[in-house]
Image (cartoon, rainbow, N blue to C red):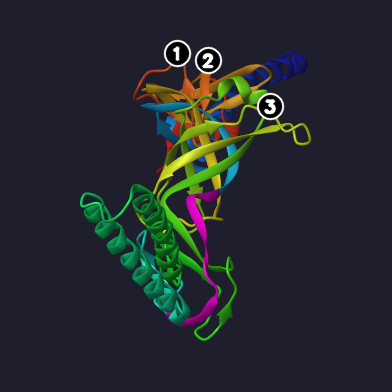
Amino acid sequence: MKKIILLVCITLLVSCGDKSGQPVDAKNTTGNNASQSGNKDSQKGKWGNKDDNTPEKNAINVEASQVYTGEAISIFNTTTILEADLESAVTSKASGIVLDINVEVGDKVSEGDVLAVLESDVQELQFKSAEANYQKSLNNYERAKALIGKGLANQEQVDNLKFETKALKTKLDEARLDLEFTKVQAPISGLITKRNIKKGNLIPQHSEVFEIVNFESIQAIVNIPESKWTQMRNGLEARINFAGIEEVVSGKILRIDPVVDSSTGTFRVTIEINNTDLEKLRPGLFGKTQIILDKHDNAVLVSKDAVIREDKDNYVYVINDDKTVSKVVIETGYEMDDSIEVLSDLEIGQKVVTTGKNNISEESLVEVVE
């Protein structure tokens, strides 16, 4: 009997333990789930949701410029030294002491102006003597011609007087020239660039006393490699830059020497420059020259900074409306200092990346900064 009662008690205890364990386990499971959910929420609050990242936060900053139209030119770059088209060393045609100097270096003169005056006492006396002798012979000749009709003079006398008068006229002209030569005159118009005499100097005949340079027509002399021979022709436009002069000076090829210098492998080209501002250009100035071999008006151009060279291809990154970029291979034409002619695949107004190209690739998202 006691055994039966003990067995019943054990059965009841086991049954109660099973029923109470199930709820406890459920509670623990729920608690754990809630704890895990809370931890996830806590982590979301701390680090943020990856889905919250916006396109702007991932954009790469770049600089850009627009595709535009302009002048595309094929150029040959070289250097030049300016020379005056007209210059003259003024020499004295007479010897003598310098009495007066009428000009200084930098003065503008016209052809025929008297630059200096030499002592002329001897020349004046010789001129007056020659003039008197000629006038006397001329009077005798005229009188003899009148007398020949009256039979008071013969033809031989008249012919002799005629010959004598002509000879004396020649001497008079020579004396007049000698007197004029005591005045040193400008052979051309221009500026005085040298003065080699002083007042009181005794100068010999044919000595160089002044130098005059005409600046109204300046020539630029360039030496071109023989490989460019077939590309050069008269009339080609040239543009020259000089240090200290803001404006680009323009000119045209005037002459092309027909012979190549065998020692240098170059030939000489003369560029004519019309210069009306005498204060800017001077012979001897060194300049950087561009000879325009060919020119395309209204060409499609991009900034040189936008073009990427890779193997044999040239390409640019075009910015799309959605701020992504597309890699576009382009065919290029003439290349200038700051721009490149584009012959295909770009339209006017499109934006291309100029700075930041190395940080992007196809379909990269970009933000253009000014």
Whether residue 147 appears in this view of the structure is yes
Q: Amino acid at mark 3?
A: Glu
Magenta-drawn stretch contains 90:
yes
Image side of residue 77 versus residue 136, left or right: right
Which x, y percent locates residue 50? 51, 31
Q: Amino acid at mark 2?
A: Glu
Q: Which residue is mark 2?
A: 331
Instruction: Report the quarter where the C terminus lies.
Output: top left
Q: Marks 1 and 2: which is nearer the front?
A: 2
Whether residue 41 appears in this view of the structure is no
The segment highlighted magenta reads: 82-100
Farthest-out residue, front: 151
Q: Which residue is mark 3?
A: 226
Q: Earlier in the sequence, mark 1 or mark 2?
A: 2
Q: Secondary structure at mark 3?
A: helix
Label 2: how many Cα within 10 Å (few below 14, some 14–19, many 20+)? some
Structural distance between the alpha carbons of marks 1 and 3:
37 Å
Q: Do the residues bearing badges 1 and 2 touch, measured as CB atoms within 8 Å? A: yes
Which x, y percent locates residue 39? 55, 37
Q: Amino acid at mark 1?
A: Asp
Q: Do the residues bearing badges 1 and 3 touch, measured as CB atoms within 8 Å? A: no
Above or below — where is 82 with respect to 228? below
Q: Residue at x 44, y 26 (%)?
A: 72
Depth order, front residue of 281/50: 281
Q: Marks 2 and 3: which is nearer the front?
A: 3
Q: Which mark is residue 345?
A: 1
Label 1: how many Cα within 10 Å (few below 14, some 14–19, many 20+)? few
